[in-house]
Image: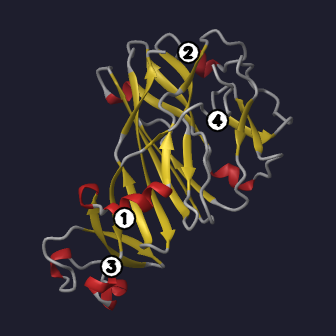
Amino acid sequence: MKPFGASFGTYEPMKIAHISFADSRNLGPRLYALDISAKLEELPELIPGKEYAFRETGGKPTALKVLRSSDFSAKLQEKLKETYVSVAPVAEVYPIPPDLPGLSEPIKRTVGTYNYYIAELGLNVVAGREAKIPTLAFEVDLQCNGKDKTDATTFALFPDDRIEKMTPIKGKISLGISKLLTFIPNPVGKLAASLVSLDIDPIDFAWTISRCRIDCSGPKNYHAYWRVYDTSNVQSFNPIMILKTRKSVTELTAKVHATYEIKTGFLGATDVRTDAKPIQILPL
């Protein structure tokens, strides 16, 4: 078992499903001043039969032409290979013992019905020599063999917006687990009091971005979402979740996909969305 917070041994590139980019040669200068309330078919500068998406830029909608992977040219494929996002093919999973000393009473009352796990995913971000990835969204859909999708949900997630306000020591943050099974981030070597003691302590979370913003949503849900933005280049990181599953759940998969923006000379600002990739969590 690798230490939590450490890099995974292998990563597998996430296959790009499609890209979308502004093509002013075909759409004209009005592209950047579209009425956000206008219907797609009512915009004369858009080409019939083509697919479009919209991106908000400075409060104004920008139309983006969608290009599916089957239409990528050989030159574009080679350029995209230089900048890629990949994930570890397996998750690091640690079951939280139901008799763990220090658990709060509200948690203790649920352990007869639910199991709790700490699950760590690996996300590797590599920007090409002439490229930057200033924005990235990473999404996780939990799929289980329970009777209902809510039989397996996230209970807590990390990183979240608290990390923006911290100053990492040597690029690391120590994560503790509270008695209520939430993540408590602290500078390395300064874990807070009132934490439960786990065999995997300490959890070191690597984070060296000096400036960024993070949106994180999904606790108490089967869909989790991280968005890192307002930075020059998104770095690799390990999303960590505390999962809550019914005792009947014996199979659990995280289907992950990424959406990110590449800024480079060969296409300008380009939005990329990957195919979903399954990562097994249960059985252990």
- Residue drawn at x 56%, y 45% as measured from the top left: 124
Amino acid type of the residue that numbered disc 4 sits on in the rendered structure: Ser
Amino acid type of the residue that numbered disc 2 sits on in the rendered structure: Arg
Quarter residue 106 falls in: top right
Q: Distance between the residues labelled 1 and 4?
A: 32 Å
* Colouring scheme applied when the structure was drawn: secondary structure
Residue named by callout 3: 23
Q: Residues within 10 Å of mark 1 (few under 14, many from 20)?
A: few
Q: In this view, does 155 lie to the left or right of 31?
A: right
Looking at the image, do the residues carrying marks 3 and 1 touch, with CB atoms under 8 Å apart?
no
The disc, 1 or 4, on the residue closer to the chain's N-terminal end is 4
Which circle, 2 or 3, is nearer the viewer?
3
Q: Give me the disc on residue 169.
A: none
Q: Is residue 14 left or right of residue 65?
A: right
Q: Residues within 10 Å of mark 4 (few under 14, many from 20)?
A: some
Q: Position of residue 55 (x, y in %)?
A: 38, 70
Towards the viewer: 12 or 180? 12
Q: How far apart are marks 3 and 1 (CA)?
A: 17 Å
Residue named by callout 2: 109
Residue named by callout 1: 75
Q: What element carries label 3?
A: loop
Quarter residue 119 falls in: top right
Amino acid type of the residue that numbered disc 3 sits on in the rendered structure: Asp
Quarter residue 78 falls in: bottom left
Q: What element carries label 2?
A: loop
Q: Give me the disc on residue 7.
A: 4
Towards the viewer: 74 or 252? 74
The disc, 3 or 1, on the residue closer to the chain's N-terminal end is 3
Which circle, 1 or 4, is nearer the viewer?
1
Looking at the image, do the residues carrying marks 2 and 3 touch, with CB atoms under 8 Å apart?
no
The answer to whether 15 is drawn above or below residue 40 in the figure is above
Q: Distance between the residues labelled 4 and 2?
A: 35 Å
